[in-house]
Amino acid sequence: MPFAEIVGQARAVEILQRERRTGRVPHAYLFHGPESIGKKRTALALAMALQCRAADEDACGACSDCRNIAAGYHPDVRVTTPEAKTRGAAEKIYIEQIRSLQQEIALRPMAGRQKIFVVDDAHRLVEQAANAFLKTLEEPPDASVLILVTAFPDRLLATIRSRCRPVRFQPLSPESVAAIVSREKGTGAEEATRLARFAYGSVARVLAADYEAMTKRRAQFLEERRRLTEGGPAALFSVSESFTRNSVEATEFLEFLISWERDLMALTLQGPAAALVHGDCAEALTREAESRRVADLLGRLELLVQSLRWLQSNVNARLVIEAALMPLGGETN
């Protein structure tokens, strides 16, 4: 996975290549941006570029260092991910994992030029682990690079953030999502474009499903939205309860609502020329947009986006979903 294989993150890649080329690679990076847009993949591309002995502007992708990093076997490149201590428990990064990292980072590189550690979903560091990790950042060993990857940088300690070089990753355009889907799933351009409509910010979700399944999923969400708009308070509590039982479905439903409201906003502001996520539903969206006010749409979008952030935190899911859906309850189309 050389830099050449990273799609839709030209600015981030440019920064990393320049720092590698000039020899100004910091001891710690903070890769942050929406989920599932290539942050971890770029971290491994950077590791490959730093270790590859044949690299010029980019890693060669063919030497033993490159091949071992791609396979996850390089002795000097380690990825730390959250773990669940018991079945069904929330996944976290625990103090034992950070102590193991500290032991390894103190050793000299075995095969590569330096030791590189990627901490994925770094916002899941428990308090003890975060404090221990901070000590490593304060006194980083020579010939080491730490890369923290997160969609929620504000959940990290401010002292950790201040000791890392931040690199922001942008949401992927539909064209970038389609290119990734086509490459990873081997689909044609037309099917990849159709699948990309359902990304809702998560390439991983699209890669794990097919167009028929995602179309059925959207139909389910549209029906739930119709229940909300026509059913009043009873429907609000019924729909809220159904999604509270499954946090993944709740997240997907809120992401769908955000994408639908954005399409309504685009049609209200731009008319038929608007680029729509749900382009195949343009007729229904246009009818609904005719009765919508920009101020109401904007307020609803802000609430949905904030509710999605809360849902991904430790806030009570039932209360978050009810608050997010309340503005939809009892609408008349």
Image: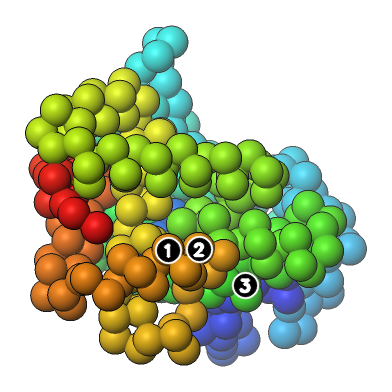
Q: Return the x and y of residue 331 as percentages of the image width and height.
A: 16, 52
Q: Return the x and y of residue 28 as percentages of the image width and height.
A: 41, 63
Which mark is drawn over residue 281? 2
- Mark 3 neighbour density, 10 Å: few (under 14) some (14–19) many (20 or more): some
Q: Nearer the viewer, mark 1 or mark 3?
A: 1
Q: Earlier in the sequence, mark 1 or mark 3?
A: 3
Q: CA distance from mark 2 to mark 3?
A: 22 Å
Q: Return the x and y of residue 33 as percentages of the image width and height.
A: 39, 64
Q: Earlier in the sequence, mark 2 or mark 3?
A: 3
Q: State the SS at label 3.
A: helix
- Mark 2 neighbour density, 10 Å: few (under 14) some (14–19) many (20 or more): few
Between residues 318 and 57, which one lies in front from this camera angle?
A: 318
Query: The C terminus is located in which quarter?
Result: bottom left
Marks 1/2 in contact by CB < 8 Å: the verdict is yes
Between residues 83 and 202, which one lies in front from this camera angle?
A: 202
Q: State the SS at label 2.
A: helix
